[in-house]
Amino acid sequence: MRGKAIILLTLASLLAGCAAPIKLIWEKPDVTQQEFNQDIYECTQETSTSWSGGGTGSAGLIMMAGARSQAQQQANNMFKLCMRGRGYADHVAKEDE
């Protein structure tokens, strides 16, 4: 059983790694680089996550990995809402951006 859990965790890690990271471009008319940097900093601070959890054995590791991933996804969504609330529009970068 222990071997199966480790394989599942490894498989989940590999599958997560296969997804290409999405690069977002943030745009806001007439914003200076300093204002943009400040907004990015503040939204990052407001939405940062430091997740810790516990579990026993391989099953605990799998549950922790899933919960951590979910917490990071929620933080990413909150970051987007923060930036949009400050007047920014986002779009996915094209390959040449």
Image (cartoon, grey):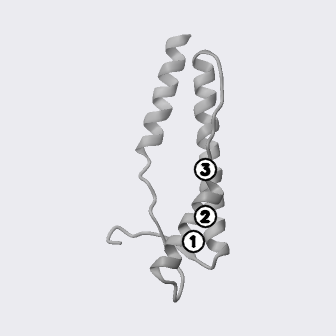
Percent position of residue 67, x then y? 64, 37
- Is 94 situated above or below 57? below
In the picture, the disc for residue 43 is 2
Q: Residues within 10 Å of mark 2 (few under 14, many from 20)?
A: some
Total numbered labels placed on residues in the image: 3
Percent position of residue 28, x then y? 54, 82
Percent position of residue 78, x then y? 66, 59
Give the left or right position of residue 24, taking residue 55 as reference.
left
Label 3 sits on a secondary structure element that is: helix
Between tags 2 and 3, which lies in front? 2
In the picture, the disc for residue 39 is 1
Amino acid residing under circle 2: Cys
Location of mark 3 (residue): 73
Q: Residues within 10 Å of mark 3 (few under 14, many from 20)?
A: few
Write down the quadrant of residue 39 in the picture. Answer: bottom right
In the picture, the disc for residue 51 is none
> Mark 1 or 3 closer to N-term?
1
Q: Quadrant of the N terminus?
A: top right
Name the residue at 58% across, 77% down.
88
State yes or no: discs 1 and 2 in contact (Cβ < 8 Å): yes
Q: CA distance from mark 1 to mark 3?
A: 20 Å
Name the residue at 48% across, 83% down.
32
Amino acid residing under circle 1: Asp
